[in-house]
Image (cartoon, rainbow, N blue to C red):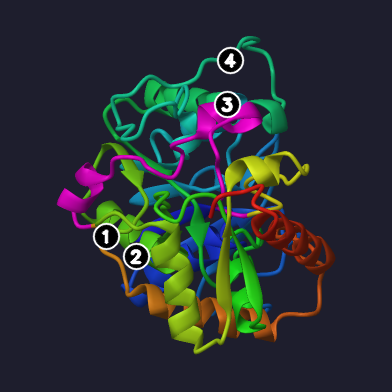
Amino acid sequence: MKILILGGTAFLGHHLVHSALKAGHEVTIFNRGRTQTDSGQPFPGVEKLTGDRDGNLDSLKGKRWDAVIDTSAYVPRIARDSARLLADAVDRYVFISTISVYENFLEPGRDEGSPVGKLEDPASEDVGANYGPLKAACEQAVEEEIPGRALMIRPGLIVGPQDPTDRFTYWPARISKGGTVLAPGKPEAIVQFIDVRDLADWIIRMTEQRRTGVYNATGPATPMSMFDFLDACVNTIGSDARLQWVDDEFLLNRDTGPWIEVPLWLPGTGDTKEARYLLNVDCRRALADGLTFRPLADTIEATMAWDASRKETERRAGLAPGKESQLLEQYAGELDGGLITP
């Protein structure tokens, strides 16, 4: 197949290029030409087109591909412009959306038929404030321009090598240092994420099969708790780390931030009320259509190897060591004083 990837240099786009090449496809990438590939090396044998999603699509004109995979549209105007231009140039349009399109996560098990969020101001392009509703509007724009020929993929938290967010990477990196590790909230809380390599391989297979429709895409195939995940990190790394579970209320009362400051922690109160079950969605449709997962240990090891190879940078997520130590000391004091029941 001839596959066009809009984006193609960072994280998921980077891995999609590798998956497509591995499967024997001809690949073209379209981007502004400003970002190196995540490996820092050019892709051999990949056609590169330069332009801008926002107003300069000229290099796409007059060409044809079997499919396009759109990894980089965040506002419906841009998604619509690309879909309209490519409507007669591709057989299938694969749009990478997000599970954040759903109206809320007040209950577990959101599936592809669950209500999506709506923009209060249809003209808004504020991605930071309206990420989910804007992605939902992008889906609608693509389907309107290419009716019946679009595949919408709604990934959950994407993790693994080249992950720029550190939301997954923080945990194996922290556990590798040993000592007492602050483990947040309830050990039995369900968590979900998907290795970027598994996601990329599956998207290419779905593209090959010319699938259409909407799919949630996250993992694993069976429920995994926060304890399961952190324990797997300890065992895979061979660390002497000891997990100290600290309850939600204690952390919230000390201005500890869910999701970014403490990755994967969603206590379901305050600002995270509507995101309580973000990491507990229904992916049975994707599983039925061939989504598979490598062993968690593989993801942990590959992420650690990549993390060790990158330049020293400040992490984008995770507790600062000093704050973690302070919280653990305070929590131990309250346990000893009988102020908290373990």
| Label ID, residue 119 | 4
Crowd around label 3: few <14 · some 14–19 · many ≥20 (10 Å): many
Q: Say which label, 3 or 1, has the lower sequence index.
A: 3
Magenta-drawn stretch, dominant element (helix, strand or loop)? loop
In the image, is residue 274 part of the stretch drawn in magenta?
yes
Q: Say which label, 2 or 4, has the lower sequence index.
A: 4
Disc nearest the viewer among 3 and 1:
3
**Residue at 38% across / 26% down in the picture?**
143
Q: Is residue 314 left or right of residue 202?
A: right
**Residue at 21% across / 52% down in the picture?**
287
- For label 3, the SS is helix
Label 2 – label 1 distance at C-alpha: 6 Å
**Residue at 45% across / 58% down in the picture?**
226
Label 2 – label 4 distance at C-alpha: 32 Å
| Label ID, residue 205 | 1
Q: Is residue 235 above or below residue 75?
A: below
User: Which stretch did the figure color magenta?
Assistant: 263-290
- For label 2, the SS is helix
Q: Which quadrant of the structure image shows residue 114?
A: top left
Q: Amino acid at mark 3?
A: Leu
Q: Say which label, 3 or 4, has the lower sequence index.
A: 4
**Residues tagged 3 and 4 counted as in contact (Cβ below 8 A):** yes
Residue located beneath label 3 in the image: 134
Residue located beneath label 2 in the image: 201
Q: Amino acid at mark 2?
A: Asp
Front-lying residue, 265 or 249: 249
